[in-house]
Image (spheres, rainbow, N blue to C red):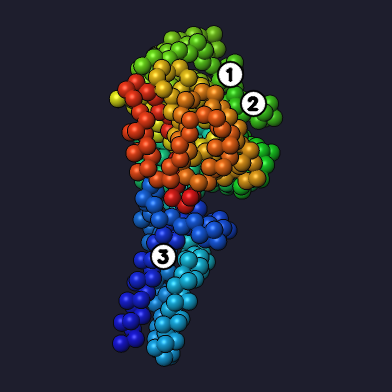
Amino acid sequence: MFILFSFLFSILFVILDLSFLKVFQLENYKPISYIKKVAKCQFAFGTKTPLKATKRIKRLFFCDFLVKFLCFSLIFAFFRIWLCILFSFILFLISDYFVLLSFLLMMPIERLIKKNYIKKAQKKLSTVGCKIIAITGSFGKTSTKNILYQILSEQFRVCVSPNSFNTPMGVCKTILENLKESDEFLILEFGARKKGDIEELAKLFKPDFAIITPIGACHLETFKSIQTIENTKFELCENTKNFVVFNDGAKKLYERFNGEKYLAGGSGFCFVKDVSYNKDGSEFNLVIGEKSLDFKSVLLSNFDNIAVAVCMANLLGESFDNIRRGVCRLKSTPHRMELIKGFANVIDDSYNSNFDGFLSALQVLSHFSGKKIVVSPGIVELGNMQYEINFKIAKEVKKYADVFVIMNKTNRAALSHGAEGMEMYFASTREEQTKLLKSILNAGDVVLFENDLPDNFA
């Protein structure tokens, strides 16, 4: 009988742990980050970012069940009923830490799985023999990657990592599931949260070419300083076989690098000028070397990213005709300065979360007519600079927008203080946000959605 009770109680408690497992997943399985969230009771009960049923989370779920089953078996086998109730209540109170215990127990197995997965990916890479282009930086990685893929695909067979698969396991998954034997180029995004992360990725997958996107204040909570961010991103330059293309926003690293290098954006080897906006997107002139090309695009921003991608494509031997065709066919990356036309125009930039990107979005917003509304929770993971940076952001919102809808509570104090004096509203959920926007929107207005926090932020 105690086995049945142990099984049922274990199932119940593990189901209750789903919120804790979701927090752990959103914190990228970092124990210290998870403990901080648990200590603040910031549990992920929302529905914006559902728990992803990855193989790793399934293994963690099963281990959590086994640990709880063992505990309940001992309790129900050796203690009286009132003690069983007491111990069950105690286990309920500390259930969130059982997720961490299960993680620690699974670490040796996870390391073996990771090692085997990497070996399989490296073996496949050696048989395909494609050239690898690695992209890193503080922001703009995914947009640059997608733009380069669309342009290069006009002339070459190209594989690209989906979404933001920028960890060793994400890269392996791309290679094993997406890379074809006929592919000539593999475009990978390299992400980092601490020093050494980029070096690990570069040594594992040995890129032939590299792109460095703008460097700025991102993940300061783990990096601690801009200097550490710069040093970490520079690890890619030091571990690339051939040349590196730098976005103008990474000019400091460009000047520091002694190998073959090219600067794009700003006024580098390749850059965009004379940008104008209209209801369908934008028009601009692109200069590459001594060549000058005119374009129309649905894109509202990312012009430096386009310049970087064009520069790389040109250096890899793509013809100007194919580059022109590729740029004209560029599509917006979902949730990254994506223009959605309707009763009110929407600029969906909800996947961006950096200061420079926010400012760029506000400048684009200024070119639209009608009432201008900004919806944002601000920026997170900025360490002790979080209040200061969000206060500055709100000051800029006040310059460019008519209405500011502040989402969540995380940065509410800094944002409301910085935007003091303008029309402001507050919302904690998407439901509140939708209801609020319906009450203030008129035909022809424009709404900028800037950043969107996952469920592990209040």
Q: Where, by quadrant of the figure, is residue 444 drawn?
A: top left
Residue 80 seen in the figure:
yes
Residues at discs 2 and 1 in contact (Cβ within 8 Å): yes
The amino acid type, in three-letter code, at marker 1 is: Gly
**N-terminal of the two: label 2 or label 1?**
2
Residue at the disc numbered 3: 17
Residue 207 seen in the figure:
no
The amino acid type, in three-letter code, at marker 2 is: Lys
The amino acid type, in three-letter code, at marker 3 is: Asp
Q: Position of residue 332 (x, y in %)?
A: 38, 27
Front residue of 337 and 116:
337
Q: Which residue is located at x 45 percent, y 10 percent?
A: 293
Q: Position of residue 286 (x, y in %)?
A: 49, 13
Dot 2: element:
helix
Could you tell whether 82 is left or right of 412 in the image? left
Measure how far apart labels 2 and 1 are at the Cα level: 10 Å
Q: Which mark is residue 81?
A: none
